[in-house]
Image (tube, rainbow, N blue to C red):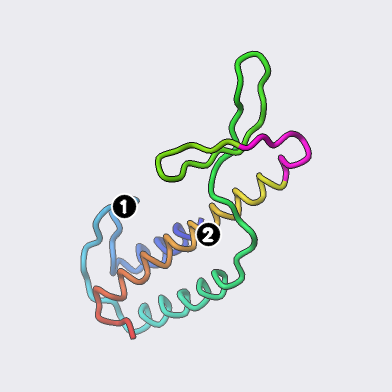
Amino acid sequence: MLLQVCLKLYNDSNRVAFLSRGGKMKKKEMTKEEIAKAKRRLKVLERLLSKAPPLMRGSIVTNGVKQKRLCFSLTKDKRTHLMYLGEGRLEKAKVLSANYGKLQEIVEEMTFLNMALLKNNALD
């Protein structure tokens, strides 16, 4: 959602066109107002990043054929690690995993803004 707000900011002004997620940007000069907006947004995102809640990378999966068991799955160093959750830890694992997704959105938006500013030589 944060990335969509950022894309709307630039698509409305037709200064930087983002072709698709992960696509290429066309370089066009940004106005001073757009540069100021982008820098303000970066500061807001930096504050959000500094207040990051507890998080965990991974996903909640079901494991088993006859008896479906809820597990937390994490792939690290080309190995998958599973941890049985049960009912007591399921809600906390969902929150931690969702927090990681929010953090990824913040980093994606910051990357997009920094790329646009860098292309316009506006980074300090």
* Closer-to-camera residue (61/9): 61
Q: Could you tell me the amino acid type at mark 2?
A: Leu
Which residue is most to the right? 88
N-terminal-most mark, 2 or 1: 1
Q: Residue at x 47, y 62 (%)?
A: 5
Q: Main secondary structure of the magenta part?
A: helix
Circle number at residue 9: none
The quarter of the image holding the C terminus is bottom left
76 inside magenta stretch? no
29 to 80, vertically: above or below: below
Q: Could you tell me the amino acid type at mark 1?
A: Gly
Image coordinates for residue 40, horizontal then vertical, percent: 47, 79
Q: Residues within 10 Å of mark 1 (few under 14, many from 20)?
A: few
Q: Residue at x 66, y 22 (%)?
A: 68
Q: Mark 2 sits on what residue? A: 103
Q: Residue at x 60, y 25 (%)?
A: 63
Image coordinates for residue 66, horizontal then vertical, percent: 65, 13
Q: Mark 1 sits on what residue? A: 22
Q: CA distance from mark 2 to mark 1?
A: 18 Å
Residue 39 as seen in the image, left or right of residue 122: right
* Closer-to-camera residue (13/82): 82
Residue 34: image quadrant is bottom left
Which residue is most to the top? 66
Q: Secondary structure at mark 1?
A: loop
Residue 12: image quadrant is bottom left
Image coordinates for residue 97, horizontal then vertical, percent: 60, 48
Residue 69: image quadrant is top right
**Region of the chain picked out in magenta, as a range:** 83-91
Residue 88 as seen in the image, left or right of residue 51: right
Q: Residue at x 46, y 45 (%)?
A: 76
Q: Residues within 10 Å of mark 2 (few under 14, many from 20)?
A: some
Q: Secondary structure at mark 2?
A: helix
